[in-house]
Image (cartoon, grey):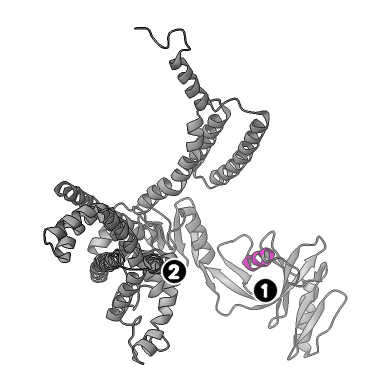
Amino acid sequence: MTNPFAGGPDRSNINRKSVKQLYDGGTPSLRGTIIKIALLAILDAVTIFVTFILFMRHLWLAVGIAVVAMLIINWLYLRRGGLPAKYLAPGVVLLIAFQIYVLFFSAYTAFTNYGSFHNGDQKLAVSAIRAAGYGVVDGAPQYDVHLVKTEKGSIEFLLTDPVNGKVFVGDSANEKLVEIPACSTAIADIIKNNSTSVSTADCETVSLGDNLADAVSAPGYAAAEQKGLSKAKLNTLAATRLYVDPANHEGQFVKTDDLMVAITYQTELVWDAKNITFTRVTDGVVFKAAEDGYFRAEGKADGEKVSDIGWRVEVGFKNFQTIFTDKNLRAPLLKIISWTFIFAGSSVLTTFIAGLAIALLFNDERMKFKRVYRSLMILPYAFPAFLSAYVWRGLLNTDQGFINNVILGGNHIPWLTEELPARSAILLVNLWLGFPYMFLITTGALQAIPAELTESATIDGATPWQILRQIKLPLLLVSIAPLLISSFAFNFNNFTLIYLLTKGGPMDSATSGYDAGGTDILITFVYKIAFSGGHGQDYGLASAFSILIFIVVATFSLVSFRRTRTLEDVN
């Protein structure tokens, strides 16, 4: 025999060259190279800017990840070859940024006390405590405030004590008060002589009535107005402290919040940066940094906190311990868990039965206009779920709702304000939203069943019920069981319907601080803990709950899928 390819080209070499050209992506054009370099330059500029912000916040791990990612992207797109990696790289980066990072961050958060009272580091907490650690001095003078402009154009305060006749200007640069003798003399004369307000060459005053006046300008300081000043400037002025003794920043100071009246305050907490402690001025109690992220009293049995402001620390399994041991959480949590399983299971069961029944009805060959009817049946599935939830909320209104007033003849059933009717309403609305999906998948599964099976069963004398129970339903479950499992997992975390329809209500007044309602499922309860809980926003506890929800759903799905394989083997 002769080789039919003898003397011809080597096909293996041709195939290898084709694969190599495909892998290399061909020879790039000059235009494509310029565009690629320009896009990489923009990406690098954004990455460097973000890295600088992360660097200033001392987020070293994030800085390292950003730099490494930038170098890999540049190396990947500037070299020849690696065409598949160039297409996969954007998707991988987005996957890491929006999925993997979120997953690991949530897991890490579950082992911290991160929340509304612990949302920063210790340095930020110290700044916040020091900023709020002062009180009003009883009997100290209050000052009327006017804004003035210096010869250099900066804005300062002109403060008048209308009782004692003293006038001061605020020196914001040195955080101190400077008395203006000329203005003090003018105001003192008005008070002493019961005269009307006067204006002199050195100090202009404005009458307050009752023989009192304010200074509105002083030597070297012209009157100014708030109008035209930026919001940031006004906030800076309102936060300015003017110390009575400039050498003692732990003593008394004057501060105005509304830029109209200034009040004398006394620092109540003295910060010791060396020992990292606060000392309360009134009784000398020392507060040290504790392991729970608070400054607590030293040597006191009750562990008094200096403030509700704390910082983020790692607390180990404390959040998980709270879930299983907190007596205040136990009763509402057990109720919520049971309702979550009832809601998810009932939703899958009712929607599957309704969808299958309609699919069987419209699968009858004798029915005309089946396409029209099927199109109408999937309309609830076509509308956005949040719009449908709002429409149903209006329909179920106790006093003005269409269901009570028209369908039920004027009965005032509290669909959304009492627990049992609210749960029934949620299942009804979810049935409305979910049966079209089940109708679609069961219709497809029914049409995939060979007609010969049902025809043979009919010839053998099987009834329609026997055909459904012994032939159609087992074959249906083989194909749609994974979809039923995914439907259960979806309804287990069906946040949208619960929150938009009832917001988890009606609320239970006996929940000991936890915002738990009669229709709350685990995911809505976790949302309230994270963003609107009675104990404040507790992201750490919410993340711990999220991990447990993931474990429950993953375990259920794993067991169910194994049962599905058994079902396939039986069939």
Crowding near the residue tagged with mark 2, few <14, some 14–19, many ≥20 C-alpha atoms within 10 Å = some
Q: Quick check: marks 2 and 1 in contact, CB under 8 Å?
A: no
Q: What residue is rendered at 34% in x and 63% in y? A: 523
Earlier-in-chain disc, 2 versus 1: 1
Q: Where is residue 456, by image quadrant?
A: bottom left
Would you place residue 9 above or below residue 557 in this image?
above
Name the side, left or right, on which 440 lies relative to 185. Answer: left
Name the side, left or right, on which 292 lies relative to 485. Answer: right
Would you place residue 113 above or below residue 332 in this image?
above
Crowding near the residue tagged with mark 1, few <14, some 14–19, many ≥20 C-alpha atoms within 10 Å = some
Q: Secondary structure at mark 2?
A: helix
Q: Is residue 300 visible?
A: no
Magenta stretch in the rendered image: 232-240
The residue singled out by tag 1 in the image is 259
- Of residues 147 and 350, the one nearer the viewer is 350
- Of residues 525 and 146, the one nearer the viewer is 525
Q: Is residue 275 magenta?
A: no
- Seen from this angle, which residue lies furthest right? 201
Q: Nearer the viewer, mark 2 or mark 1?
A: 2
Residue 498 on image: x %, y %: 36, 70
Picture quarter with the N terminus? top left
Q: What residue is rendered at 45% in x and 58% in y? A: 119
Mark 2 → mark 1, Cα distance in angstroms: 46 Å
- Of residues 446 and 414, the one nearer the viewer is 446
- Which numbered marker is on residue 185? none
Would you place residue 531 above or below residue 478 in this image?
below
Q: Is residue 311 visible?
A: yes
Amino acid type, callout 1: Leu
Residue 566 on image: x %, y %: 16, 48
The residue singled out by tag 2 in the image is 386
Residue 551 on image: x %, y %: 27, 53
